[in-house]
Amino acid sequence: MKRLSVLFTALAIIIASASCNADGGVQPSMDNAVIIFFSATGNTERVAQELAAITEAHIAEIEPAEPYSDTDLDYRDDSSRASLENSNPAARPAILPLSEDISGYDTIFLGFPIWFGDMPKIIYTFLDEYDLSGKTIAPFCTSGSSGISRAEENIRAMESNATVLAGARISNRESLKS
């Protein structure tokens, strides 16, 4: 648990230390950060809330227009909604507008569970619908076993005009609190 606290403290230091770049321009800082997350079962929401308490950043949830049911999330069923979305590269589940206007934030902590080794398609929808150009994106995920590297690569590919930091993976059993 202390390891996670240290991990997010280090992430905050990295962002804060990037406040000035070599040419004197201002870079994103913790003073202007928002946590945006999607959570289908509550694990990522718990981590996002803990991160908000640590960073004092604003928080906004990515909500599906059609909420996921337990049946939708049955990964063992190839006909479940999550499985069908995952198998369709063009899938973009509709989302509700965020509760927070993120246009003025420089740093976006982006949280999500790992589904099928990647971020859920609803995160692809978010990245398609919101302009994150010029922002710093700090991804974090919850997962029982899979890492975040594939999601990081996909975020970088989709947000080529943003700075995407190395992501953090939090086990579903871990907490950010020390």
Image (cartoon, helix red, strand yellow):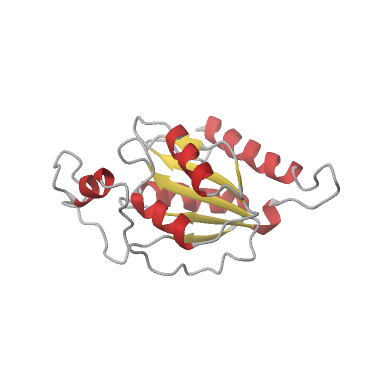
Task: State whether residue 122 is above or below residue 87.
Answer: below
- Residue 128 found in image quarter: bottom left
Instruction: Identify which residue is drawn at 65% across, 43% down.
Output: 12
Q: Quadrant of residue 74?
A: top left
Which residue in the rendered view is the most extreme toward the right? 24
Placement of 148 over or under 58, stated as above or below: above
Above or below, 136 relative to 146: below
Q: Is residue 164 left or right of residue 120?
A: right
Between 97 and 125, which is closer to the camera in this rendering?
A: 125
* Front residue of this view, candidates 157 and 176: 157
Q: Picture coordinates of residue 59 (x, y %)?
A: 52, 60
Residue at 40 percent across and 34 percent down: it is: 171
The part of the image, by quadrant, that contains residue 134 is: bottom right
Q: Is residue 71 left or right of residue 106?
A: left
- Residue 163 lies, with reference to residue 127, above or below; the image says above
Give the total of numbered labels.
0
Tell me where residue 44 appears, x and y as whole percent: 40, 48
Name the quadrant of the C terminus: top right
Q: Position of residue 20 (x, y in %)?
A: 80, 47
| Most foreground residue, 148 or 51 | 148
Residue visible at 49% across and 56% down in the picture: 36
- In depth, the one of 20 and 91 nearer the eye is 91
> Who's the residue at 39% across and 44% down the image?
119
